[in-house]
Amino acid sequence: MSTLPNISLTQLEYAVALDTYRNFNQAARSCLVTQPTLSMQVQKLEDTLGVIIFDRSRSPVVPTPIGEKIIEQARLVLRESLMIKDIAESDQSEVSGDIKLGILPTIAPYLVPLFLKEFMASFPKVNLSINELQTDQILDMVARDQIDAGILATPLSRQGINELPLYYEPFVAYLPADHPLNAFDKLPMGEIPFEELLLLEEGHCFRNQALQICAHDVVHSRHQASFVSGSLEMLLKLAEQGFGITLLPELMLVGWEKRLDKVKSFAEPVPTREISLVYSRTYLKRSIMDAVTESIRKSVPKSMLKKSGSVLKPI
């Protein structure tokens, strides 16, 4: 009868951390141990398996080809081990535990204030950590188990990632007060001149969706708008001063009674973005995830819970 190698979950955790940070000191800090301790356990894992997992001659340290396969399996083993705790916690009547979320910067400022206060009051034993991150960062950190889930624009159809739609948010246009397009009751897609469009900088999926609304070729064009920013608030201020037109997510209008006269809705089919909770195929912390999902859906307008209009691809 064959015997399994004497491998511990701790050793797998340290190896995964080293792959994530590609630096012994940073990996050790993330695991709350000293660098010699982490190095010793990774070496012990290699000795037990009889292979070299990491190429230490390179900086940053990188996995060997066989090491990449071992680390990939180690991540799966660690996820499965966490499911034991998750199953036990799901049997408890009280929702508790830690959860780390990554949220797009074009979503977080308008969504989080709507649901966070009530969520924390309803689930006082949940420790919620929120980081504003870009789409690629969120997907990478979910895949590496550095965060539990992300809230971003979908559909993305990425391998190993599940998408749970939360709500469907229409886009609106914000026009200078004297702009000719104010003559439209509802603004048709494609009517906004590209040269007047104020855009977010490269890397924001909101930028790509804005270009689609203006019927502009996102991939092939090399033309640049006059004003590009990393902040919707900056674009809004430029539009207020008459520098052009910007597009906004509808949740940004909450509490905007004094500015609504400059907001123009789109004609049917209304351009819309699908906002989803994304997580790895191993669905951990199910009870907390369900609580977050329910709180978000209760906080947004009911009209956004049903799919309608024209859902734009974020990428």
Image (cartoon, helix red, strand yellow):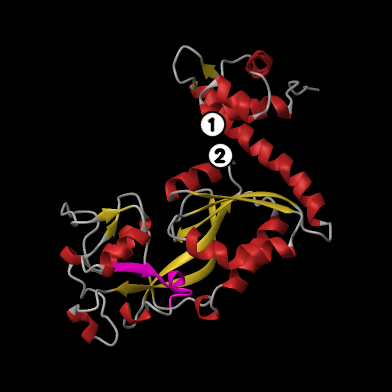
Residue 261, quarter of picture: bottom left
210 or 142: nearer the viewer: 210
Question: Which numbered tag is attached to residue 20?
Answer: 1
Does the rendering let one see residue 265? no
Q: Residue at x 66, y 13 (%)?
A: 47
Does the rendering let one see residue 183? yes
- Number of on-image labels: 2
Image-based side of 84 in relation to 68, left or right: right
Q: Residue at x 27, y 63 (%)?
A: 238
Q: Position of residue 193 (x, y in %)?
A: 17, 69
Q: Callout 2: helix, strand or loop? A: loop
Relative to 290, does residue 138 appear above or below in the rendering?
above
249 or 315: nearer the viewer: 249
279 inside magenta stretch: no
* Residue underneath mark 2: 144
Quadrant where the image shows the C terminus: bottom left
Q: Position of residue 71 (x, y in %)?
A: 58, 29
238 or 303: nearer the viewer: 238
Relative to 60, does residue 306 appear above or below in the rendering?
below
- Amino acid type at circle 2 is Arg
Q: Position of residue 255 (x, y in %)?
A: 48, 75
Residues in magenta, as a range: 246-256
